[in-house]
Image (spheres, helix red, strand yellow):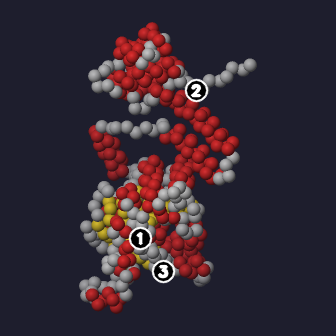
């Protein structure tokens, strides 16, 4: 009968780690956050390492052969590991603790391989269940595998000196030239907005909100286009409201300058056709990925975004729009569901270290006030949206509120001309920077926003 194959492990590396801890009390500082007791294959070594960690967590204790033996005896585990003689053996095989991190890396790598084997078993079990929802089964399988990957990158407390050093190193590299293909922050392509925000920052959740028909989807698409063309940024666009054909038509109109209605109906002249084909050539080279599934859950968005991120490397995720994301089907209010959705989007931004731009509706409350300028409280099913977002942008247009005749009844025609096509972009929340307002020009014929040369107001 063939001998059963043992999972990957390295007993010598495990013993070398523990021996290093026994001869050097400070060695634990180098491995405590990255190496867990369950990373050890041999149970005896698990027990000893756990005892070392227990001593490490007590401020007045040191780690050596005597204290570890005492701790194991207190737990009634000393004889189980082979007594003090085994601890002496571990000390004898390690002449120095200099390479403890190297040994710990071997132990950790072997543990990852064992988790990978276990994950394969879990994925096989999901397959054998043969559930009716194939997409849900695939999401579960991907999540199992992702958990293995995620455990390789533990985060820990870092001394501020190290953070400052990393910051200035990265800032210095950015000032010289970023590495090829590296995008430190995604630029919207709107000069005043980028000056305000410094671009869309990694790990941030940015909420873009407006009333119906003010161009929030158009602005999100313009940002995607600008980042993809100007920076070669990889964009994952989840369009829950518009089909991918409609998204492409809008992008074509903005890029070609041909009326969006003409493109939608296919009614354009020969000259327009040339411009559309040129625009198509430009857009076809951009790394914009579109998913127009109408009933997405956050788990679906997370799974699809992670898959693309590992295959291609995402620079920006856009979700249009937030309130169309499906809840989990439990007996929760919509406010509770939105709270979980925004929390999940923020977690996704941090998990992949990319900005997530979520388009959002406003509540009807803004229409009942004398002033229709949006406030944070107007975010539909708000509370959690306002809380989770790092940046909140509102679009407001006076020309959608007042006719020219109404405008000139209360404004000086020379000093304040009618703001046709002028959009105010209000930065209502900016967790790491100033609040304020910028102005953009909106070209409704082609559903496109453009820079407007005007000073920023703070």
Residue on which disc 3 sits: 445
Q: CA distance from mark 3 to mark 2?
A: 63 Å
Whether residue 38 is situated above or below residue 165 in the rendered picture: above
The quadrant of the image that shows the C terminus is: bottom left
- On the image, the x and y values in percent for residue 217 come to 47, 69
Q: Residue at x 33, y 77 (%)?
A: 369
Image-quadrant location for residue 243: bottom right
Whether residue 156 is situated above or below residue 413 in the rendered picture: above
Relative side of 271 to 365, left or right: right
Secondary structure, mark 1, is loop
- On the image, the x and y values in percent for residue 70 come to 37, 14
Q: Which mark is residue 363?
A: 1
Q: Nearer the viewer, mark 1 or mark 2?
A: 1
Residue on which disc 2 sits: 8
Q: Residue at x 59, y 82 (%)?
A: 268
Label 2 Cα crowd, 10 Å radius (few <14 / some 14-19 / many 20+): some
- On the image, the x and y values in percent for residue 275 come to 55, 75
Q: CA distance from mark 1 to mark 3?
A: 27 Å
Do the residues under discs 1 and 2 have CB atoms within 8 angstroms? no
Quick one: 128 or 303, which is closer to the camera? 128
Query: Which residue extends farthest front?
Result: 331
Q: Residue at x 62, y 24 (%)?
A: 6
Q: Which mark is residue 404?
A: none
Secondary structure, mark 3, is loop
Q: Is residue 288 visible?
A: no
Q: Nearer the viewer, mark 1 or mark 3?
A: 1
Q: Residue at x 48, y 64 (%)?
A: 323
Task: Decide which of tag 1 and tag 3 comes sooner along the chain.
Answer: 1
Task: Decide which of tag 1 and tag 2 comes sooner along the chain.
Answer: 2
Q: Nearer the viewer, mark 3 or mark 2?
A: 2
Do the residues under discs 3 and 2 have CB atoms within 8 angstroms? no
């Amino acid at each position: 009968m063939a001998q059963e194959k043992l999972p990957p492990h390295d007993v010598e590396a495990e013993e070398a780690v523990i021996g290093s801890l026994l001869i050097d009390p400070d060695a634990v500082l180098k491995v405590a956050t990255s190496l867990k007791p369950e990373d050890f294959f041999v149970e005896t070594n698990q027990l000893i390492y756990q005892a070392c960690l227990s001593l490490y967590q007590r401020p007045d204790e040191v780690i050596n052969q005597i204290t570890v033996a005492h701790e194991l005896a207190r737990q009634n585990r000393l004889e189980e590991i082979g007594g003090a003689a085994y601890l002496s053996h571990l000390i004898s095989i390690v002449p120095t603790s200099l390479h403890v991190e190297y040994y710990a890396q071997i132990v950790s790598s072997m543990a990852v391989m064992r988790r990978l084997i276990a994950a394969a078993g879990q994925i096989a079990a999901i397959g054998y269940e043969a559930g009716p929802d194939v997409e849900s089964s695939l999401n579960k399988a991907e999540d199992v595998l992702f958990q293995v990957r995620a455990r390789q990158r533990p985060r820990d407390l870092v001394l501020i000196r190290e953070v400052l050093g990393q910051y200035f190193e990265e800032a210095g590299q950015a000032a010289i030239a970023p590495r090829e293909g590296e995008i430190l922050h995604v630029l919207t392509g709107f000069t005043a907005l980028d000056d305000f925000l410094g671009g869309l920052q990694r790990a941030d959740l940015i909420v873009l909100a407006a009333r119906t028909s003010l161009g929030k989807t158009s602005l999100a698409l313009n940002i995607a286009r600008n980042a993809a063309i100007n920076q070669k940024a990889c964009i994952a666009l989840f369009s829950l409201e518009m089909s991918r054909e409609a998204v492409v038509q809008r992008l074509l109109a903005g890029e070609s300058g041909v009326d969006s209605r003409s493109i939608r109906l296919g009614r354009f002249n020969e000259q327009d056709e040339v411009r559309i084909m040129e625009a198509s050539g430009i857009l076809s080279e951009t790394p914009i990925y579109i998913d127009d599934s109408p009933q997405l859950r956050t788990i679906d968005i997370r799974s699809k975004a992670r898959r693309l991120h590992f295959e291609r490397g995402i620079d920006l995720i856009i979700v249009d729009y937030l309130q169309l994301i499906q809840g989990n089907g439990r007996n929760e209010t919509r406010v509770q569901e939105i709270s979980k959705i925004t929390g999940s989007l923020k977690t996704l931004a941090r998990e992949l270290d990319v900005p997530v731009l979520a388009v959002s509706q406003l509540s009807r409350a803004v229409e009942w006030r004398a002033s229709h300028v949006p406030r944070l409280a107007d975010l539909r099913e708000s509370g959690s949206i306002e809380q989770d977002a790092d940046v909140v942008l509102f679009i407001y247009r006076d020309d959608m509120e007042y006719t020219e005749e109404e405008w000139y009844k209360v404004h000086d025609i020379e000093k304040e001309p009618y703001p046709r096509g002028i959009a105010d972009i209000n930065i209502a929340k900016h967790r790491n920077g100033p609040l304020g307002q910028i102005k953009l020009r909106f070209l409704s014929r082609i559903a496109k926003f453009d820079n407007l040369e005007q000073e920023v107001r703070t």
